[in-house]
Structures are given as structure tokens and as C-alpha cells.
């Protein structure tokens, strides 16, 4: 899986579906949220064979915004701290604020790899959006800034999910 991701490719459907679906079968709660799955119609059909998906949220963010954010991301590998050179830069460029150790850019965050990932995403995921749109469960929120999109998503989820669920987001029901 790592070599696929590092090369900007998506993990094959059968591999990712087996991994995700085996974990979903073990979830005892009735509400849950998936991020980044399904990415293909084949994965969506596999998911439907296990559960009834009642809501799909699509964050419609321009690819140029996504590319800019990902190629500006640097991490401190030991701690997992994430920096962004545009909106959350380290005090000293290339150096972790806490330890003083060097930051690293992930292999899958280089401009060429991000471009390949986004092209693959568009090619494979657009049919998934159409699949869920045709089922009447797709909700799309558009924008370029998290702090502007999130209040709309949060309001939608508050209406969608009963307050007795403890405020957990749902993407489907077992």
C-alpha cells in the first residue's frame, strides 16, 4: 500500500475494501463516519453490500487549493506534528518548534505526486459522487477554507443526527 501511495496511486479496490469492510463489521455503534472511502464505484458497491449508507458528504474544494496545502505540508516524523508553510509555519523554517529537529516533506506531498493523486481522484471519484447523487444521499459543501465550510457541515450534521447519539457524525448505518 505504501508504494502505491508514495507514487501518487490509489490503493487497489479489493485491498482497501477488504481492509475497511472488515473493520466496519466489528463496529458496534450504529453511527459512524468514513473519510476517503469509498473512492470508486466498486468500493461503493462493496460498502452497500455490508450496510445502508444514508449520508455522503462531499467537500468540494478546488484542486489548486488542495495542491497548495499538501505541497506546503511538512511533518516532524517522531511526534506527528504537522506544519504548513502558508498558515501554520514553524518558527524556524524546516525545524520542529518543540525539538529543534528537522522537518520532512512526505513523499506523497511533492508537487508531481500530488498532481497525479488529484488526477486519479477526479477520474475515479466523480462516478462515486454521481452514484450517491442518484441515490439521493449526497450533500456537497463548497469552499476553500475549513473555517468557512465547517459551520455548514456541522449544522447539517446537527440536523441529520439525533442528539441522543452524542454528536457523532454518521456516514452510514450498520
Image: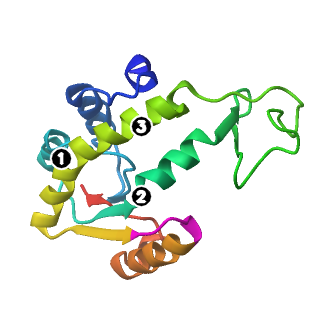
CA–CA distance in space, label 2 to label 3 = 13 Å
Horizontal side, residue 19 vs residue 5: left or right: left
Q: Is residue 64 above or below residue 109?
A: below
CA–CA distance in space, label 1 to label 3 = 24 Å
Locate residue 152, reporting x and y percent: 45, 78
Name the residue nearer the viewer: 147 or 44: 147
Can residue 38 be seen here? The reply is no
Residue on which the image places disc 2:
62
| Quadrant housing the C terminus | bottom left
Dot 1: within a 10 Å radius of its alpha carbon, few (fewer than 14), some, or many (20 or more) residues? some
Locate residue 81, reporting x and y percent: 72, 40
Can residue 134 be seen here? The reply is yes
- State the SS at label 1: helix
Q: Is residue 76 above or below residue 43?
A: above
Q: Nearer the viewer, mark 2 or mark 1?
A: 2
Q: Earlier in the sequence, mark 1 or mark 3?
A: 1
- State the SS at label 3: helix
Q: Which mark is residue 44?
A: 1
Horizontal side, residue 157 vs residue 56: left or right: right
Residue on which the image places disc 3:
115
- State the SS at label 2: loop
CA–CA distance in space, label 2 to label 1 = 23 Å
Q: Is residue 73 magenta?
A: no
Q: Is residue 146 magenta?
A: yes
Is there a contact, CB below 8 Å, between mark 2 and mark 3?
A: no
| Quadrant housing the N terminus | top left
Residue 113: image quadrant is: top left
Amino acid at each position: 500500500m505504501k508504494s502505491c501511495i508514495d507514487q501518487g496511486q490509489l490503493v487497489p479496490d479489493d485491498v482497501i475494501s477488504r481492509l475497511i469492510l472488515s473493520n466496519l463489521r466489528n463496529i458496534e455503534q450504529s453511527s459512524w463516519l468514513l473519510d476517503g472511502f469509498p473512492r470508486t464505484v466498486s468500493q461503493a458497491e462493496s460498502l452497500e453490500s455490508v450496510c445502508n449508507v444514508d449520508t455522503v458528504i462531499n467537500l468540494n474544494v478546488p484542486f489548486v487549493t488542495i495542491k497548495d496545502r499538501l505541497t506546503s505540508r511538512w511533518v516532524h516524523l517522531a511526534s506527528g506534528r504537522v506544519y504548513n508553510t502558508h498558515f501554520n509555519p514553524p518558527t524556524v523554517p524546516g525545524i520542529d518548534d518543540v525539538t529543534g529537529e528537522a522537518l520532512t516533506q512526505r513523499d506523497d506531498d511533492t508537487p508531481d505526486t500530488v498532481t497525479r493523486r488529484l488526477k486519479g481522484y477526479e477520474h475515479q471519484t466523480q462516478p462515486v459522487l454521481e452514484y450517491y447523487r442518484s441515490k439521493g444521499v449526497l450533500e456537497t459543501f463548497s469552499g476553500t477554507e475549513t473555517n468557512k465550510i465547517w459551520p455548514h457541515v456541522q449544522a447539517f450534521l446537527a440536523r441529520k443526527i439525533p442528539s441522543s447519539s452524542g454528536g457523532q457524525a454518521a456516514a452510514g448505518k450498520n
